[in-house]
Image (cartoon, rainbow, N blue to C red):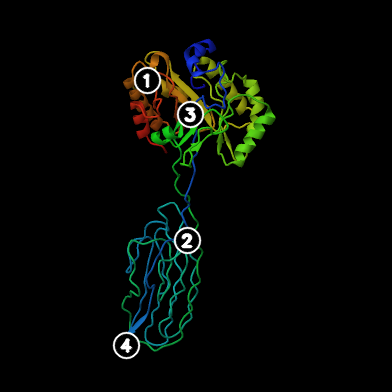
Amino acid sequence: MTREIKKLSCPALLAAFFAFGASCSSSPETGITKGIGGTSIATGGGSTPTGGSTKGAGGATTATGGSVTGGSTSRAGGTMAATGGSSKGVGGATSATGGSATSTGGNTAGTGGLGGTGGIRDAGVAGGTTSAGGTVNTGGAASTGGASSTGGSRDAAVTDGATSTGGSRDAAVADGATSTGGVAGTGGTSGAGGAGGKSGAGGAGGSQMQPFKGIAGGACKVRTAMKVSWYYNWSPSENEACAAPNGVEYVPMIWGAGTAASIQTTVAGLASKGFKYVLGFNEPDNATQSNITVASAIALLPAFNSPTIAVGTPSTQANTTGQAWFTQYMADVAANTALRADVIAIHWYGWNAGSCDAAASQLESYIKYAEGFPGNRPIWLTEWGCLNQSAPTAAGVIAFFQAALAVFAKHPRLARYAWYQWSPNCEVYNTDDTLTDLGQVYAAAPSMK
C-alpha cells in the first residue's frame, strides 16, 4: 500500500489531506508507500586449512655422558604421548611418530619415523593428512628425525625431529623432550628424514549477520534513531538518502506494471549500482494500488531477471482476495522453472478488534501460510501493522509488537520486516521526527540476525 492513501478512497483522501496538498493518486516515486523485506543468508568465513601449530622437538637425539637419550617423541591419536596434551581446535589431534632416533651401541639402525596423520578436527575442518616419512638408512649413531610434515602452518620453528602438524595444541610441547635411551654407541651415518605431507582442506565457516529490522519510508534522521539495518520507499530510487553513508541498506521496488523493456532497463541500472534485491509489484490484487492481474505479472516476471539481483515476489493483501491472487501466482511460478521468486514478500495488517492480540497469533497464522509454499524461500514482511479497530490503544500496539518479535524468533524463515506507521497508535515517530513510545521499543529491537 502507499503511505496515507492505501486504505482510503480518493474522495476521502482529498477531504482528509486537502490542507496538505495531497492528490488522489500516489506515485511510487514519491516514497509515499510502504514495505520491507528480505534476507540473505550468507555463509562466511571459511576456516583456513592451517592444521594448527604444533611445536616441539619430535625426537631430538642428545648424547650425554656416554648414553644416548633416545629422544623418540610419540604422539598417538588425539593424545600427545610424553610431550604434550590432547590437541584441539582446527586440525584436531596430532599424531606423529616422526623423528624418533635410537642409537644403541655401535652400528645400529636409526629409524627416522613415519609422518603421522592429522587428527580429526573439532571445528568441521579436515586435518591435514601427512605423507609417510621416508625409510631411514641403517647407520651408527642417532639418525635425524623426519622432515616436518605439513598439515597446516606452524607457530614456530621445530627443532630436531619430525613434527606432524594436525591441529593447534592446548599447550606447547617442550622442544627436544626425550626419553632416556640405551648404551652409548659410536657415531655412524644419519638416516634420511621423512617426506612432507599434504596440507588439510579448509572447512566452511559460520553464517554472517544479515539485515533484519527495517522500516517503510522515513527520513535519514528517523532511520538512524530507530537503528534499522534496511529500508525501502516503494520506488526504484532512494529519495530520502542520508547525506553520508550510514550502512543502512536501501532495497528498490518496481511498484507497478510498465513495459517489459522499461523493467529490464530499470533492473539493469540497479544491478550496475550494486543493489542485491528488487521487490516486485505492490499489492497487485488491490484496485487502489498497482492493480495487476496474475497473468500480466507472470508475463512481466522474466524482465526482472538479473544474475546479481534476487527478485522479491509481488506483495498482496492478506485478505481472501490477496491470498487467492498470491496462491495462483506462486503456482504459476512453480510450473515454469525459468521464472524466479527468490524472496516471498508479504503484507499483513490487523483490522478487526482483537486481531493485533498480545500473542500476535493471527500474524503468526499468516506467516505459516507463507511458509506453506514450496521452495524454502526467505520471507520478508514488508508491510505490517494495526489498522482500523485492531489498534484501540498505543499500549496494546506495543504489546502486539513485542509478541511479534517472539513469533519471528520461532520462524527463522522470517528474514526481514518493515513496520508501516501511518495509522493511529502505530506511529513510531512524530512529525518532528522524534520517536514515540512505540518507536523507542522498535529502536531497541535487534537490527540484524
The percent position of residue 127, horizontal first and vertical second, equals: 45, 58
Locate residue 307: give its quadrant. top right
Nearer-N-terminus badge (4/2):
4
Query: In the rendered image, is residue 66 in sight?
Result: yes
Q: CA distance from mark 3 to mark 4?
A: 86 Å
Nearer-N-terminus badge (2/1):
2
Q: Are marks 1 and 4 in contact (CB under 8 Å)?
A: no
Nearer-N-terminus badge (1/3):
3
Pointer 4 residue: 66
The percent position of residue 201, horizontal first and vertical second, equals: 50, 57
Pointer 3 residue: 217
The amino acid on which the numbered mark 3 sits, given as a three-letter code, is: Gly
Residue extending farthest to the bottom is 186
Residue 75 located left or right of residue 375: left
Q: CA distance from mark 1 to mark 4?
A: 92 Å
Relative to 344, is 243 above or below?
below
Relative to 141, is 375 above or below?
above
The amino acid on which the numbered mark 2 sits, given as a three-letter code, is: Gly
